[in-house]
Image (cartoon, rainbow, N blue to C red):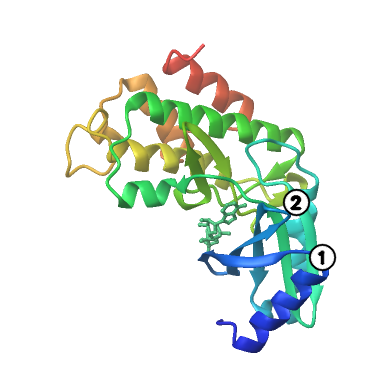
Amino acid sequence: MKLNGRDIRTIKGALSLSGYQLSGVLGSGRFGTCYSVSRHEENFALKVFNKNDVKRRKTKIAREGKILAAIDHCAIPKMIQVIDADGIYGLIMEKKPGNSLEELINWDYDFSENEILSITTQLIDIMEYLYSLKISHRDVKHSNILWDHGKIFLIDFGSARMLSEQKRRFNADFWGIGDVFLRLALTSQEMALDEGDFSVDGLGLDDMQKNVIKRLLYSKQPYESMYAVKRDFKKVFNLD
Ligand SMILES: Nc1ncnc2c1ncn2[C@@H]1O[C@H](COP(=O)(O)OP(=O)(O)OP(=O)(O)O)[C@@H](O)[C@H]1O
């Protein structure tokens, strides 16, 4: 749902009360729109939710801010402040640098094997941290990972839940890690064997490496813990 001039004025008004200024649009998705805002020459990201969702599902929307506030990790945006005025509901959070992996893939960036292994290892480490807090992200995908000078940042906690709230037959986080790896590897000249084969078997991996990726993607015996994901990934790719 688009915002009209009055909504923008309301957002600007609510922001100015806390000393922030609107400076640009970062992107939009199912939830609403992300803006760039600044205060004292520091930039932040502001996520403004669709007005209809705010009316109907405010408790669910508020969950994202609560979960972000419980997280303290350098690869995840810190929660700064909730904006809640005149039907506008938004979250001000730390603005992380970089472009999303989706953008890089669309720009035909040729990821090296080392870069893909580094990205996946960092992602597994971030997920291990989240699991230590019993938080499941549930929307791990290339568009929710920013990449800057070799470091990744995981954004968009709109689908995140506490692990205890979930029925655990399918783990979206394991699948997401496998999906990010596969998408990057299939676009990599170093890793993709055959341009027409969009499966794990189209990658230049040995059988043990393929088995770990297939287990992440639920086409082989699925994983039961993040610990086992990390252990096996490091072992088969010699990352210790
Ligand atoms: N904390 C942040 N720091 C820097 N950029 C951000 C931050 N949060 C969001 N963005 C930018 O805003 C864009 C849109 O935000 P978000 O990821 O929440 O939605 P989306 O993934 O595009 O939507 P959907 O959830 O529908 O897939 C992102 O692609 C990213 O470029």
Residue situated in front as seen by the camera: 187 or 223: 187
Identify the secondary structure beneath mark 2. strand
Q: Residue at x 68, y 77 (%)?
A: 53
Provide residue 165's location: percent of width, then percent of height.
76, 52
Provide residue 227's location: percent of width, then percent of height.
63, 25
Q: Residue at x 67, y 46 (%)?
A: 77
Q: Is residue 136 left or right of residue 219?
A: right
Label 1 vs label 2, nearer the camera: 1
Q: Gap between marks 1 and 2, in whole Å?
A: 15 Å
Q: Residue at x 67, y 35 (%)?
A: 74
Query: Crowding at label 2, few (<14), some or many (≥20) Cα neighbours within 10 Å?
Result: many
What mark, if any, has residue 171 been given in the picture? none
Provide residue 27's location: percent of width, then percent of height.
51, 64
Q: Is residue 174 left or right of residue 193?
A: right
Classify the position of ligand 1 by quadrant: top left, top right, bottom left or bottom right. bottom right
What mark, if any, has residue 18 been given in the picture? 1
The quarter of the rendered structure image containing the N terminus is: bottom right
